Image: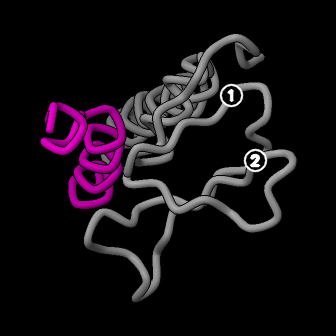
């Protein structure tokens, strides 16, 4: 649950109360770029706010760290189970396991943008 007293920095000098944010959508089309990364819907604001921060960073600032960890944990367990099953059957698909491991690591790694102060 988001901490209602917490103000979340969205970028471009914009802030929103954590408990008023009800939807977050990464921008994936040609609108993305030049600091436009995420659409944030805030209660009482008609149009989504364009944020320069990633959805993961915004969720973490909202206090939703557990929401970010659960899918990663599920993916890690799935990867470990696949590796165990495939190694027992003698049919290890290293390309598939490598892709899954890379996706999992990319999901947990912080980008350079997350570490920049300015």
Residue drawn at the location 41% of the way across and 62% of the way down: 37
Q: Position of residue 107 (x, y in %)?
A: 36, 41
Q: Residues within 10 Å of mark 1 (few under 14, many from 20)?
A: some
Q: Position of residue 79 (x, y in %)?
A: 42, 36
Disc 2 from disc 1: Cα separation: 8 Å
Q: Which circle's residue, 2 or 1, is located before the other in the chain? A: 1
- Depth order, front residue of 102/67: 67
Q: Position of residue 95 (x, y in %)?
A: 22, 60
Residue drawn at the location 43% of the way across and 83% of the way down: 31
| Quadrant, the C terminus | top left
- Depth order, front residue of 51/76: 51
Magenta-drawn segment? 92-118
Q: How many marks?
A: 2
Magenta stretch encompasses residue 18: no
Q: Position of residue 44 (x, y in %)?
A: 86, 49
Magenta stretch encompasses residue 107: yes
- Depth order, front residue of 1/105: 1
**Which quarter of the picture shows residue 115?**
top left
Q: Is residue 96 above or below residue 108?
A: below
Residue drawn at the location 54% of the way across and 28% of the way down: 8
Mark linked to residue 35 = none
* Horizontal side of residue 14 vs 91, given as left or right: right
Label 1, secondary structure: give it: strand
- Which residue is denoted by mark 1 in the rendering? 17
* Horizontal side of residue 117 vs 49, given as left or right: left
Circle 2/circle 1 CB separation < 8 Å: yes
Mark linked to residue 42 = 2
């Amino acid at each position: 649950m988001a901490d209602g007293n917490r103000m979340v920095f969205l970028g471009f000098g914009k802030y929103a109360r954590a408990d008023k944010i009800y939807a977050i959508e990464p921008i994936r089309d040609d609108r993305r770029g030049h600091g436009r990364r995420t659409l944030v819907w805030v209660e009482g604001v008609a149009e989504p706010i364009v944020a320069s921060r990633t959805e993961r960073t915004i969720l973490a600032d909202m206090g939703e760290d557990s929401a970010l960890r659960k899918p990663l944990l599920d993916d890690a367990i799935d990867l470990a189970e696949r590796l165990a099953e495939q190694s027992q059957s003698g049919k290890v698909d290293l390309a598939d396991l490598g892709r899954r491991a890379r996706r999992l690591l990319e999901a947990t790694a912080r980008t350079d943008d997350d570490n920049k102060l300015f």
